[in-house]
Amino acid sequence: MKCSFCDEQALYVRPYDKLALCHEHFNGKMQKRVQKTITRYNMLKRGDRIAVGVSGGKDSIALLDILHKIEKDFPESEIVAITIDEGIEHYREEGMHYAKLHVSRLGIEHHVFSFEKDFGHDLDSIINKLGARGKDRELGACSYCGILRRNILNKAAKEVGADVVLTGHNLEDEAETILLNIIRGDIQRLGRLNPTPRKIHESLVPRAKPFRATPQAEIVMYCLINELEYQEIQCPYAIEAYRGDVREFIFKTQEKQPMLCYNIVRGQDKLLASIKEIKPKQELRNCKECGNATTGDLCKTCWLKQQLDN
Ligand code: SF4
Ligand code: ZN
């Protein structure tokens, strides 16, 4: 089959609009969509120091590669890569290898932070101590991991002087988060899921997701045709992720309805645009231990520290 835009052989046919794309036009469309997403949601400003979270998986590697191409037109901005080592044996080492490989190939400044060094415990030892389902049986490995990764990524962003943090969350990830908040009836979180990075607390560096309109399949394809190697094995704790059921629903339904995730994400955008403001139940204040943003007395990181010290 020929490319819809030239005489070259098509490598990919987009299921939602049936456009057939050759290598060059596929790359062009990917880059354009990221640029459009950044502009549409005011994700970046000229001269920003941009921290990109790079785990070594397909999303972060593809994002870094595309941002590096875009950045050539904005030499006053600067990209810096941040990798966080959670301390997951037989897993993190490989991701770290790919993160380093691509960061050095692109000549980008790289900073590595770790749970062990920046929190005092790695994830494996936290799970050993608290159990995979946690003391209160409500939190699993991914919840601990998420709490610490958010905290350390924010700390890292401040340390490297970043104005904004970009992460590789893709269209399906975003749709999944929106659906989860609806299922849980968590309107506050749904309201906070704003694609435009905002300074919601003095201690937090604003974050954005330039891949929020890019389907996972296209990210995989981008890595494949551009020969970008990435970590493919799954985290050993992923199996217990609570998001699993919603994810399964999305991928099953998407086969019959290729616009599913676009519709969910666009629906969220329209919802945010049509409501003035969802008043937070509690205002953000400073954690009494570390000063970071929290709705209670202690932030989740300090709470986790207490659990481990008990
Ligand atoms: Fe962390 Fe869970 Fe992701 Fe593993 S699957 S890296 S535990 S969030
Ligand atoms: Zn705290």
Image (spheres, rainbow, N blue to C red):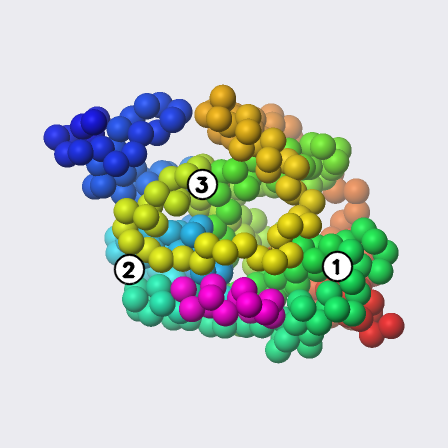
Residue pointed to by mark 2: 75
Which of disc 3 and disc 1 is earlier in sequence?
1
Q: Which of the 4 quarters of the picture holds residue 185?
A: top right
Judging from the image, what secondary structure is the residue with disc 2 in? loop
Q: Quadrant of the N terminus?
A: top left
Judging from the image, what secondary structure is the residue with disc 3 in? helix
> Disc 2 and disc 1: Cα gap in Å?
46 Å
From the viewer's side, name the closer residue of 152 and 137: 137
Q: Is residue 232 above or below residue 243?
A: below
Residue pointed to by mark 1: 132
Q: Is residue 307 above or below residue 282?
A: below
Mark 3 and mark 1 in contact (Cβ < 8 Å)? no
Q: Amino acid at mark 1?
A: Ala
Residue 270 in picture, x, y percent from top left:
56, 27
Asked whether residue 294 appears in the rendered view, the answer is: no
Q: Quadrant of the C terminus?
A: bottom right
| Residue occupying the point 47% across, 66% down | 94
Residue 135 in picture, x, y percent from top left:
84, 60
Is residue 199 located in the magenta-colored stretch of the structure?
A: no
Q: Name the side, left or right, on which 238 lies relative to 50.
A: right
| Residue occupying the point 78% across, 56% down | 133
Is residue 89 located in the magenta-colored stretch of the structure?
A: yes
Crowding at label 3, few (<14), some or many (≥20) Cα neighbours within 10 Å?
some
Magenta residues, start to end: 85-98
Asked whether residue 236 appears in the rendered view, the answer is: yes
Q: Amino acid at mark 2?
A: Pro
Residue pointed to by mark 3: 216
Which of disc 1 and disc 2 is earlier in sequence?
2
